[in-house]
Amino acid sequence: MRFISTRAPGGAGTAGAAETIRQGLAPDGGLYVPETFPRLPEEWIFAEMPYAQRAARVLSLFFSELGELEPVTREAYARFDDPACPAPLVREPEGWHTLELFHGPTRAFKDMALQVLPDLMLRACEAEGKVCILTATSGDTGKAALEGFAGRGGTFVIVFYPKDGTSSIQERQMTTQQGDNVGVCAVEGNFDDAQTGVKRLFSDKAFREAVARRGYSLSAANSINIGRLAPQIAYYVHAYAEMVRLGEVKPGGEVNFCVPTGNFGNILAGLYARKMGLPVKRLICASNRNRVLTDVLTTGRYSLEREFYLTHSPSMDILVSSNFERAIHLMGGSDGSLTRSLMENLNHDRSFVLPESVISTFREYFSAYTCDDTETLNEIQESYNASGRLFDPHTAVARKCLRDHQNKTGDAAPAIVLATADPFKFPEAMLRALGKEASPGADSLRALSEATGHPISEQLRRVMELPVRFDRTVKPDAMGAAALGFLKD
């Protein structure tokens, strides 16, 4: 498999899997995408097999040059609650299903990919020496990256997160991280400020040279890296296979997926799965009050000239959705010139308008809805009152948006909601939804458990007992110095 940059004119220039994973971001500032999409063999979709085996087969279509991948996926998912089925599919009273993606070591869907990426990265960098993994997070990617790379020889992982832009539990997961090869730093501003800062460092020649002098090459762990995105395709294939196994859909029958998304990586993996032959009818994009994705998918206009909101679903508090660039490249006929032009407009003018032909193509695949904070809390409360089920705020957004889609369109296709996090990662919001008092940290964890009878996972319980190691906050223009300080230390 060869990969091209989203911004390469006419798809010029290709890179292999190892180079693509190692670099993270393409030299021209674009994102790597497959030159062509492989076809999923039907037996891989419909046959019963352990999750790790199916995931390895999907990844082999992209990364065959990295060798046999099933040992990688088996080791990655051995750390989940049920290694044979790390992403259980649960039927809900409403008739749809929930794909629970939060049963890994950090209790968020990012584990599904970030427990795989370290071994892919080490194979990709085998002949290149040490690698520094630099990433920005809106909450869950950071801890998942830290957990995946901690203690791995030949790597150093540095995470930047927005100060006051994550839940107290998400922040504590990162700032208490153990390991000699990790660094964590808060950034003044929001996630977009942190993400823009990281992208700026990747394109900063002086910074890259300073990293190289310390003996490291530079790469990324968030979904700008195709090695992080590709493992997410596997859980769409797994979910469909489970629907067939359970008799909820006949082989070849279409299903809808409703995905809470901010950076567009999670739902993009579903689009890639459909392009590979998975029978997906609609991808329903669920946004919170920061509805930039809902707006572009319904109007074709992407604008950053809007108010930024801190919400109860902080991992979706994003305006600059990096992976939307990959979707534009695909929907625009793989024209790198178009993608480059639109991204330049976004950078300079803070907006762009999709050509009508492109937005029409988007509408063939996507529907988009928005759920505000009040609706999110109501959804959490109503779900708990009706069935005793607890859904984190991001998953609650998706549940509300799926219901809106079904009511608006009458779409009766089998549907799957992607549940992206353990509700105990957001105890303050959960308690507020249930009409209970909330205080930050461990007190809220205990209060939520006592109020609902649901247990606190051992992973989150341990985090609250660890000492804080990282407490520094910097301005965005000081992120480079902070990163180099970690490498120096």
Image (spheres, rainbow, N blue to C red):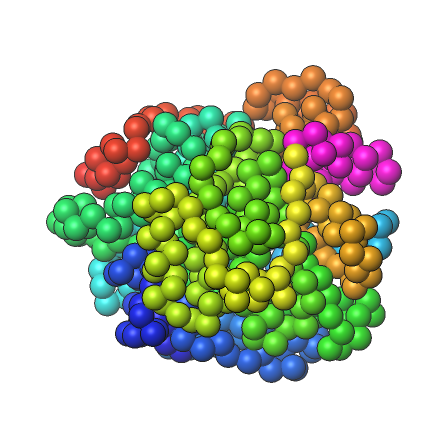
Pick the quarter of the image with the C terminus.
top left
Q: Is residue 432 visible?
A: yes
Measuring from the top left, give residue 446's x and y in whole percent: 67, 24
Residue 342: name its quadrant.
bottom left
When the figure is inspected, residue 96 is found, relative to residue 364, above or below; the finding is above
Residue 238: name its quadrant.
bottom right
| The one of 291 and 244 positioned closer to us in this rendering | 291
Residue at image point 65% right, 56% down:
367
Pick the quarter of the image with the N terminus.
bottom left
Measuring from the top left, give residue 172's x and y in whole percent: 48, 30
Measuring from the top left, give residue 42's x and y in whole percent: 65, 81
478 left or right of 247? Answer: left
| The one of 379 and 240 positioned closer to us in this rendering | 379
404 left or right of 489? Answer: right
- Label count reads 0
Farthest front residue in view: 356
Q: Is residue 469 visible?
A: no
When the figure is inspected, residue 87 is found, relative to residue 182, above or below; the finding is below
Residue at image point 78% right, 56% down:
409
Residue at image point 59% right, 24% down:
442
| The one of 361 and 275 positioned closer to us in this rendering | 361
Q: Is residue 275 magenta?
A: no
Residues shaded magenta = 373-395
When the figure is inspected, residue 331 is found, relative to residue 371, above or below; the finding is below
Residue at image point 79% right, 64% down:
413
Query: What main secondary structure does the magenta stretch of the protein show?
Result: helix
24 left or right of 326? Answer: left
| The one of 187 and 439 positioned closer to us in this rendering | 187
When the figure is inspected, residue 257 is found, relative to residue 437, above or below; the finding is below
Q: Is residue 391 magenta?
A: yes
